Amino acid sequence: MPPAASTIAPHVDALFYAVLGTTTLVGLGVLVALVWFGVRYRAGNPVHRHGDIPAAQARARRRVEVAWTVIPLLLFFAAFGWAARLYVQRAAVPEGAAQVDVVAKQWMWKFQHAGGQREIDELHVARGTPVRLLMTSQDVIHSFFVPAFRVKQDVLPGRYTDVWFTPTLAGRFHLFCAEYCGTDHAAMGSGEVIVMEPVEFQRWLAGHPSARDAAARGEALFRENGCSGCHGAGATVHAPDLAGLYGRPVPLADGSVVTADERYLRDAILLPRKEIAAGYPPIMPSFAGRIAEDDLLDLIAYIRSLAEVRPAPRS
Ligand code: CUA
């Protein structure tokens, strides 16, 4: 096994070994019974046809059958419950996680820290700080896989997936693409996640200054693409105010309510007719094919940065 280098890794390992141990025991039990019965009954007792079995023996048989049905069932439920709890834990991003945007492409990983620092095939993170990766692909399906953290998540074109981990060991850990993605798929398996002590990581961030952070880049794009003409402060067009929007429930024209997460924001920009905010005319143009994936992530970083801004009172 690779080193267990994240908070979730020991839990994944415990489940893995428990399932491995249980299945090994059951497998051995079946093997031993198989050999034992093969030897014990090799001459062949008179074969009972159905109905010829004495009542006491029939009852014993039923008990055995119930036992070999119920016990494995309980074992499966136990494994399911355990795994489901871990799955939920793996899916719930902790508060205060550092945000990193990821765009996968043939054949590299592009990372951008919230502070605007960009990296390719290398990701620097701080030990002890949860990191949340918001990921998409600009071509085919890739898969983000760091064995030492026990996390693996498909990275899909046309949508966002996320994954988080809290590294517990400093060091360099292998980053793989775990989905065959074309000729140089193997080359995507040479990336590294570099876990540094927090102080060291701050020094690294400071040593790679970026003119603009992700949200500031997004703000510039917000103007360049004309978004501010309708959604900006003082716009005369009746368009949803983006201040304080992120993470909030959004009532839709069809009566349903969705959460304004990254998935919603992405679709609102690329597929504006899909979910129309209640009370607004469907006049938003689609930006599909006009915005690169990295720019879209920057735009969303900007809208996310407005989450704490109080929405302007509407008349
Ligand atoms: Cu990307 Cu395999």
Image (cartoon, grey):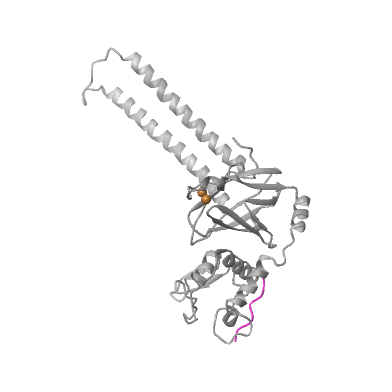
* Stretch in magenta: 308-315
Reply yes or no: does residue 190 show up in magenta: no
Front one among 70 and 250: 250
Q: Position of residue 24 (x, y in %)?
A: 48, 28
Q: Is residue 217 above or below residue 35?
A: below
Instruction: Tell me, yes or no, whether the highlighted magenta stretch contains residue 311.
Output: yes
Q: Is residue 205 left or right of residue 27?
A: right
| Residue 259 visible somewhere in the drawing | no
User: Can you say which quadrant of the picture contains the C terminus?
Assistant: bottom right
The percent position of residue 29, horizontal first and vertical second, equals: 43, 24
| Image quarter of residue 206 | bottom right
Q: Main secondary structure of the magenta part?
A: loop
Q: Residue furthest front?
A: 183
Say if 102 sits above or below 17 in the image. Answer: below
Q: Quadrant of residue 240?
A: bottom right
Compared with 122, 221 (above or below) is below
Query: Is residue 41 left or right of 94 when viewed as pictured?
Result: left
- Foreground pick, 233 / 313: 233
Q: Is residue 27 visible?
A: yes
